[in-house]
Amino acid sequence: MIKVILNGCCGKMGNAIVESVSKCSDIEIVSGIDKHKNDYYKFPIYDSIEKCKEDADVIIDFSRPDSIADLLNFAKRRNIPIIICTTGFSKEQEELIHSFSKSIPVFKSSNMSIGINLLSGILKKVSGILYNDFDIEIIEAHHNQKVDSPSGTALMLYNSIKDSVKEDLPISYGRKGISKRKKDEIGMHSIRGGTIAGTHEVLFAGRDEIIEFKHEALSRNIFAVGALKAVRFVADKKPGFYTMDDVISELIK
């Protein structure tokens, strides 16, 4: 049985993780961390990771960026792998995360969906071929309570494209007024409304033809399923930095 500490257990994604774990025979949530407690989970909930007493094999983080330093220090002190699903980190926080991967297994992904990560892989293969003849735009849509914009997934897709071409490809965040498109830019557009779980579209617009890549999350369950695949993957790994690409590589062996 893989024992899990779930940071952000009472949030929307935390609830989805708890529900998915309830259907598993090999994973158990032994404690949760959340400032907003509820009374209907069977496991203990603490308002700080430092108060957690239970032993665990993996930490899952679905919360806010400001908790990352405490989580990493706790994970290192206990020698526990950590899965980071939170987005919106600063450059300094990203560097901190990578530095801790030298001491413990650190798994990080802006999106836990297998589908979106396969899309990212496809973009890495086709962007270099299409770039010279196509303009590229990224459109993402999320629920009206999402904090960061653009989404971490949209930035992940952007980096998949950027790393596939020689040009710098600066981001143009929306357009207003006189804003003729520049060839080397990638347009980035964010939509916020209702209960949209997450939609990401990459548009390649060429002369007389359009190619569209689109992923639509119909519920948060797909992210929970991906997170549990990551739990099984990282539980016995050595220190290092891991992503969903590593999970996918293992799945297709």
Image: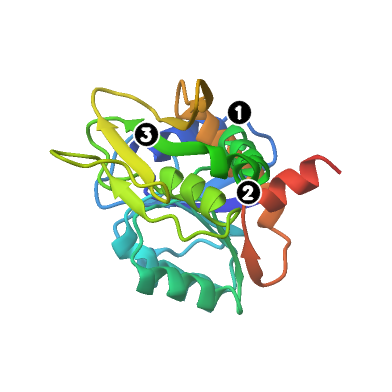
Q: Nearer the viewer, residue 50 or 115?
A: 115
Secondary element at tag 1: loop
Residue indicated by mark 3: 140
Secondary element at tag 2: helix
Q: Nearer the viewer, residue 71 or 140?
A: 140
Residue indicated by mark 1: 23
**215 lies above or below 26:** above
The residue sitting at the right extreme is 253
- Disc 1 to disc 2, how far (Cα)? 22 Å
* Left or right: 133, with 230 as reference point: left
Residue 10 appears in the rendering? no
Q: Are marks 2 and 3 in contact (CB under 8 Å)?
A: no
Q: Earlier in the sequence, mark 2 or mark 3?
A: 3
- Disc 1 to disc 3, how far (Cα)? 31 Å
Quadrant of residue 242 in the image? bottom right
Q: Which mark is residue 193?
A: none
* Left or right: 22, with 73 as reference point: right
The mark closer to the camera, 2 or 3, is 3
Residue indicated by mark 2: 244
Q: Amino acid at mark 3?
A: Glu
